[in-house]
Amino acid sequence: MHIKKYDFNYSRRLFAQRLSSGVMGAGVLTSLWPLIANSGDVAKAYPEELRSLEAYTKGKVKEGDYITADNVEHVKDLLAPIVYLEVAQMGRRIKVVPQTTDIQKLYPYDFLEATLRNSGKAVLDEVGNVVVKDSGAPWIGGMPFPDPGSGLEAFSNLGITAGRHDTTQFAAKDWDLSADGDIEYEYELAACEKNAVARVSDPEGPYWKGHEDKLRYTGVWFVSPQDVSGTSFLNTIHYDQRKFPELVGYIPAFKRVRRFPTNQRFEPLVPGITVFLSDFWAAGDPMLTWGNYKIVGRGPLLGPQSDNWHGDADNWIPSTHGGPKGTTFWDTSYELCPEVLVIEAEPTGYPRAPVS
């Protein structure tokens, strides 16, 4: 009997082998990042079952379908556990869209170009901070470790360059629901982030002069409802990732600026909000205030990568569904991501942390 090398389960075996042996390097049929540099398209790095959900599930769920409680068991291994629970028990549904293979649709151009240009120039110093090889200077832009060799290197790609842009600004609305699906709090706010280092679009170079010892500044300000309008916060994150950020805020009711204890990263900024400073980009804390980073999983995943811009909706707000009153989940689209890393870490700097 002749066993084909690239049979249906080849990628599963390869991912398991790499995980157990500690071998890194993305891509199955060929190395991913050289392919990206040459063609800008990731399709040729993966076999068909990692490019199409229809192929992966052997036709049970396909692009264009909705994942619901009726078919979620066929893709359970591709979903985060909480997403599986939401679909299976809480009425969530997720539209499946085709995989995005054009890398320029997944990264801002300047950030992608810096990642390719600076590949191989990053190292972790003796305490774990990302620095430029040989010089020891702060990072100069793009992902520092496109092919990470450890859990900490992998997480550095988020912890150091999470926003992917030099400066970002967001306008947002927030609804906080009770267990019964009722709106208990509703806020309008804006947020801004400015990188101090690893800048990729600044003609003056990768560093904001005079701020090279900082990683980024993030600000949040609330404009409604009236009782919190004007409430604002500034979070200053040091480049040395062992240091806690400096968090100051203005509270209109007290008409003064006060400093907040930033080791309490899991406290709400205003009543009712359940998104905390620690949650931003899934990397809101300085990465060395967490520890014991490990790569514990590798393989495909269903996740939101595209088709989630609702420009034709009023105020760009998507529709909702699910939960007790049809308001618990946004209408969202997921696609098959061919290869992801699962990183485990512990909040070693946060004895009160409710998560790990």
Image (cartoon, rainbow, N blue to C red):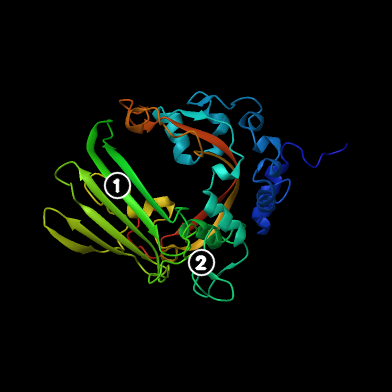
Q: Nearer the viewer, residue 282 or 215?
A: 215
Q: Name the residue located 56 percent from the left edge and 38 percent from the top edge.
A: 78
Any part of residue 263 in sight: yes
Query: Badge 2 is on which residue?
Result: 139
> Mark number for residue 202?
none
Q: How many marks?
A: 2
Amino acid type at circle 1 is Ala
Quick check: 263 left or right of 20? left
Nearest to N terminus: mark 1 or mark 2: 2
Q: Nearer the viewer, residue 161 or 303?
A: 161
In the figure, residue 352 lies in which quadrant? bottom left
Question: Marks 1 and 2: CB-CB under 8 Å?
Answer: no
Q: Nearer the viewer, residue 3 or 204?
A: 204
Q: Name the residue located 71 percent from the left edge and 42 percent from the top edge.
A: 44
Considering only vertical position in the picture, is 131 above or below 158? below
**Placement of the N terminus among the 4 image quadrants:** top right
Considering only vertical position in the picture, is 164 above or below 44? below
Local crowd size for mark 2, using a 10 Å CA cut-off: few (<14), some (14–19), many (≥20): many
User: x and y percent of residue 324 in the render?
Assistant: 31, 27
User: x and y percent of residue 10 in the render?
Assistant: 73, 42
